[in-house]
Amino acid sequence: MAVTASRAFTCYNHKLFFFPNTSINLCPTPIKVPSLLLNGNGNGNGNGNSLFYRPKNPIPRCVHSAPKNLETHSQSHVPRRRNVIEILEERGLLESITSDKLRSACSDSNLKVYCGFDPTAESLHLGNLLGIIVLSWFQQCGHKAVALIGGATARIGDPSGKSLERPELDPDSLEKNTQGITNTITRILGRNTKPSSDSFVIINNYDWWKDVTLLDFLKRVGRYARVGTMMAKESVKKRLESEQGMSYTEFTYQLLQGYDFLYLFQKEGVSVQIGGSDQWGNITAGTELIRKILQAEGAYGLTFSLLLKSDGTKFGKSEDGAIWLSSSMLSPYKFYQYFFSVPDVDVVRLLKILTFSDIEEINELEREMKSPGYVPNTAQRRLAEEVTRFVHGQDGLDEALKATEALRPGAETRLDWQTIEGIAKDVPSCSLAYNEVLNLPLIDLSVSAGLLESKSAARRLLKQGGLYLNNSRVDSEGKKIEAQDIVDGKILLLSAGKKNKVGSCNDYDCISLFERLECGFMAKCNILGGCKFQPISFAHYSLREA
Ligand SMILES: Nc1ncnc2c1ncn2[C@@H]1O[C@H](COP(=O)(O)OP(=O)(O)OP(=O)(O)O)[C@@H](O)[C@H]1O
Ligand SMILES: N[C@@H](Cc1ccc(O)cc1)C(=O)O
């Protein structure tokens, strides 16, 4: 058979891509892509052997409002599903696609789309949330979402965007991380999916890699991979320029991810892979292998821009102060506070990227922000509520709102032990012997607990009306701690608020909690600093022994 291998070029978002000319049929008989069967019994292929599973107890759908912009109405008033690519573009969630044909593929059929996450930490983080959100948009437009846990690839370590080789992970950590990430994805995507629906699955690439031998790999994959093409990938070029260079193991990473795509395309009918822009090289490694090995068309890649911090570095897990999605690593309260504190210049962009709110509503909010009657932080509140609800559910949002109110200097809410206990790990807290606290002048306590640097600073703040005990402003310099100040006989809350600056980061910057401990030893104190999209940093210091 004669094959003409001419190529067409297309330019998208300032990137030049190639894709094979559609008129060329490289394959004598069209490759039939088997469909991903997800039937009622939860077995992907009906014989109980599928790689795919559905959570046994799907999490109930949350009250998160259904996006209004999913359906458009034609003149005959028959609702038409919106193309997911248009939605992603409109919201700033699309950086590149491998071919423009993905647009028509998305409107013509129900696709299966996957995003991979290497289990290199116990929890996913804010950067990873973008992949979940894009998967979710695909789901909402009628496609199927596949979340891949890189149980095999995490053993190798993706060099993309990394200046150093990642440390090797031991099997126990991998197992723990896989469990943590699976729980988070199940929780978030499950909540967003109808209980009866099978529109998302979670798989682990270790399931197919564990049995592949080196000889198999070299024969089945290596033979088709051109070293020149591999070397030209950004992730490789950068590392080769670095002092440390790159190991052969890391160099093969792109082929592992490439083969994953081929495997899923061939065995499960997954035709789209999505990822952050750092994944472009790995994703195209997959589309290239599919074209070469299977001689098939119809596999697409899509990337979105990386979410960056104000210092230009990406939100990631390796960097300090990650915004974790797991509530055991970052409480819903702190998660909420983070979004509540984003600056005005970022809030609209983040509403578009991180929420499913109607785009018109967001544009309206943007207009309101510029008008005189705008109540400061309305947009931030909306952002914080929507993202917290998406990630932690309505319960998590309620917990965050309760804690926010309880910790607001000047708040009228009566403090109770349970609420404070719920947030104790989120604000600087320490334990002191009951007798040490009772009758101690408030000024002295503010210093010995590390709330303020010196007694004079404490006096100054008090005079300015910024020193609070259990959310009530203290005016008297001679104030001593009395028994009734210790809430439920267990705890008290000290805050250095800046003149009731409601909702500012200072609300949680300077709060100390004191817990009575019979033995009277001092615990560690965490001071939370940083906001406004700066990395959150934790300064630890120990208090003296009682
Ligand atoms: N800041 C970010 N913005 C957008 N997407 C991101 C961001 N960080 C990671 N991702 C995406 O999340 C997916 C999984 O990334 P993965 O967890 O393996 O690496 P990582 O979090 O970048 O790790 P590390 O922080 O160790 O570099 C990829 O598609 C990646 O592009
Ligand atoms: N390489 C991706 C994770 C991944 C792993 C395997 C895949 O098939 C896809 C994606 C990352 O580090 O972010």
Image (spheres, grey):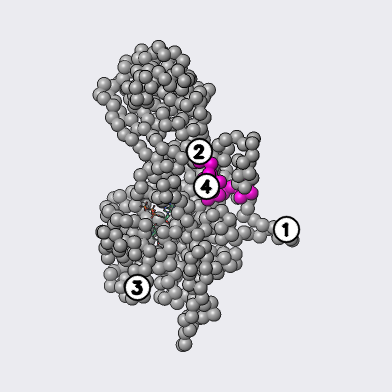
- Using the numbered discs, state the Cα–Cα distance from disc 2 to disc 3 in whole angstroms: 47 Å
Residue contact at pointers 4 and 2, CB within 8 angstroms: no
Q: Are marks 3 and 4 in contact (CB under 8 Å)?
A: no
Check whether the beta carbons of the residues at disc 2 and disc 1 lie within 8 A of each other: no
Q: Quadrant of residue 162?
A: bottom left
Residue found 47% across the figure and 20% down from its top: 465
Q: Residues within 10 Å of mark 4 (few under 14, many from 20)?
A: some
Amino acid type indicated by mark 1:
His
Q: Is residue 323 magenta?
A: no
Task: Name the foreground residue: 181 vs 254.
Answer: 254
Q: Is residue 352 magenta?
A: yes
Measured along the vertical axis of the image, is residue 406 above or below residue 210?
above
From the image, tell me which residue sits under label 2: 340
Magenta segment:
343-361
Which residue does the numbered mark 3 point to in the structure image?
228
User: 10 Å neighbourhood of mark 1: few (<14), some, or many (≥20)?
Assistant: few
- Identify the residue position indicated by label 4 in the image: 350
